[in-house]
């Protein structure tokens, strides 16, 4: 694709400072790094991390304070801060009112309460189709007079390509059963997770599906331990699943806390089987009859709609996606970015088209995508990369855009809620900074918005990438605290000497003249 000829730094700063004025063409060489604050150097020392494990930038939003950067143009793993890229581009390209849906359809005749043919359960990127929502869909079917289905349940996942992206994929880590590891598809019945109730008792751990599912047996071999109930998953070991004569047996292993009861949902059986067993149990509970099988395929031409469930608008779903760092929601939204181009590009996967939509947005906003690596849009990836400057420039563009409030309301608030509720509580950033967190085994990151002591807003992006990573969060918290106390003038006053030798103090704004009309 065509690259911008202007330096990415200049473009990002122009977006941050003037928001509406074009950037000047400038030399491509990056400016030297600014000094690191003493508190950040101390945190790096305490964590035994080298300075080059950190990359960060702070861009002023609508005021002329100097920008600040440290290795700002180095591509880094963003971890879950990549959800900001998906959020910003989706708000602009798809709008906050986009809603997923799940539809019941059929092309079969209905006579005397009997549907004489297949029933289609069609996925439309609906992340809200839990057990209660599926029950409500089937209740609507019953209220239309359907009491018996003499056909199969057809699962239509064709909204995305391929329909089953989970098949043949290696697990991301050693905990594939847990919700964060679900690879979404267009039809996510109960989130593709088996609902479970686990309870410790005098004879060990009892386990049951919620609701009970005929043909599925759960046997617990879990032992009891003394860890707190909130840490029940720490003792989990992979379950053993076997199939015989149309029945499924799940054997649970590991340890579970004494005097503990947990309602959870885990990825333990194939999603086709899960959909079929939930459908059968709920339909039978409503007094319906069905003896067909489950298969995958597209709805036939001319199928008529019998019932439909609408998900919450994505403007609302961004809140749990970003505040709680929900990987499945982010991956689903990333796929939605690719849907509009599927008909024009039949040979491309939906994920590839979603990535192309992100790059097109970057180009349209004058942000060079050199070094940007896209995978699934959630940050749960070993390959995704972005520079802090690219991330901050994206945030600056979003700040000036029509959906700024939708994005800001979705971000965790320092010391208050989401994944930041226990961080920065004693900092001036508490209650003000809205920052997306990110964490992988070798990466920790923060990106979003904060205000300094004068009330001036900043777009910030910062990442620590190192193995081991222990103490990386403290480094980023120290940097956020320094910015919240004084903005970049305070950072600029830091001693320039640092480990690895001194470098010539630089300023990101040295790459561009401050435009007039800053607001």
Image (tube, rainbow, N blue to C red):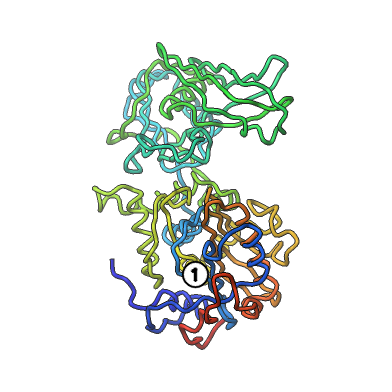
Residue at horizontal 70 percent and vertical 52 percent from the top = 422
Quadrant in which residue 473 is drawn: bottom right
Q: Nearer the viewer, residue 131 or 219?
A: 219
Residue sitting at x 63%, y 55%: 471
User: Residue at (70%, 72%) from the top-left corner?
Assistant: 485
Return the residue nearer the eye: 410 or 126. Answer: 410
Instruction: Name the secondary structure under disc 1.
Output: loop
Q: Quadrant of the N terminus?
A: bottom left
Residue hosting label 1: 71
Residue 420 point in image, percent of width and height = 65, 54
The crowding category of the residue bearing disc 1, from other C-alpha atoms within 10 Å (few below 14, some 14 to 19, many at least 20), is many
- Residue 238 coordinates in the image, percent (x, y): 52, 27
Left/right placement of residue 293 relative to residue 500 reads left
In the rendered view, tell whether residue 286 sits above or below residue 190: above
Q: Say which of 298 and 175 sits in front.
A: 175
Residue drawn at x 40%, y 84% as measured from the top left: 24
Where 467 sits versus 205, above or below? below
């Amino acid at each position: 694709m065509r690259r911008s000829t202007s330096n990415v730094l200049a473009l990002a700063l122009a977006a941050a400072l003037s928001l509406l004025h074009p950037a000047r063409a400038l030399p491509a060489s990056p400016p030297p790094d600014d000094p690191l604050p003493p508190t950040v150097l101390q945190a790096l020392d305490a964590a035994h991390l080298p300075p080059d494990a950190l990359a960060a930038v702070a861009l002023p939003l609508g005021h002329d304070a100097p920008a600040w950067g440290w290795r700002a143009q180095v591509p880094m793993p963003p971890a879950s801060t990549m959800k900001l890229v998906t959020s910003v581009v989706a708000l602009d390209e798809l709008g906050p009112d986009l809603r997923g849906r799940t539809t019941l359809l059929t092309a079969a005749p209905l006579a005397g309460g009997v549907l004489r043919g297949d029933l289609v359960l069609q996925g439309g990127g609906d992340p809200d189709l839990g057990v209660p929502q599926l029950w409500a869909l089937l209740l609507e079917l019953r209220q239309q007079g359907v009491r018996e289905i003499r056909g199969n349940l057809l699962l239509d996942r064709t909204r995305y390509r391929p329909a089953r992206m989970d098949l043949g994929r290696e697990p991301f880590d050693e905990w594939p059963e847990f919700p964060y590891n679900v690879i979404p598809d267009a039809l996510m019945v109960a989130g593709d997770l088996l609902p479970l109730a686990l309870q410790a008792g005098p004879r060990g751990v009892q386990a049951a599906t919620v609701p009970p599912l005929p043909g599925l047996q759960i046997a617990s071999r879990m032992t009891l331990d003394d860890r707190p109930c909130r840490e029940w998953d720490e003792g989990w070991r992979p379950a053993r699943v076997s199939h015989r004569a149309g029945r499924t047996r799940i054997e649970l292993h590991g340890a579970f806390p004494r005097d503990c009861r947990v309602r959870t949902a885990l990825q333990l059986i194939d999603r086709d089987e899960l959909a079929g067993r939930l459908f059968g149990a709920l339909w039978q509970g409503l007094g319906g009859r069905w003896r067909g099988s489950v298969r995958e395929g597209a709805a036939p031409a001319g199928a008529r709609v019998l019932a439909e469930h609408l998900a919450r608008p994505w403007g609302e779903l961004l809140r749990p996606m970003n505040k709680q760092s929900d990987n499945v929601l982010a991956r689903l939204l990333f796929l939605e970015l690719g849907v509009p181009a599927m008909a024009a590009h039949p040979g491309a996967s939906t994920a590839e088209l979603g990535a192309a939509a992100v790059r097109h947005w970057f180009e349209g906003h004058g942000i060079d995508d050199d070094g940007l690596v896209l995978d699934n849009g959630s940050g749960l990836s070993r390959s995704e990369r972005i520079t802090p400057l690219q991330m901050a420039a994206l945030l600056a563009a979003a700040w000036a855009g029509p959906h700024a409030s939708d994005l800001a309301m979705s971000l965790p608030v320092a010391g208050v809620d989401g994944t930041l509720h226990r961080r920065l509580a004693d900092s001036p950033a508490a209650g003000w900074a809205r920052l997306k967190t990110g964490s992988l085994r070798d990466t920790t990151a923060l990106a979003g918005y904060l205000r300094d002591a004068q009330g001036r807003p900043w777009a910030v992006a910062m990442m620590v990438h190192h193995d081991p990573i222990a103490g990386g969060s403290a480094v980023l918290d120290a940097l956020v605290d320094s910015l919240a106390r004084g903005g970049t003038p305070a950072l600029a006053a830091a001693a320039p000497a640092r480990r690895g030798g001194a470098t010539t103090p630089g300023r990101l704004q040295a790459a561009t003249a401050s435009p007039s009309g800053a607001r």
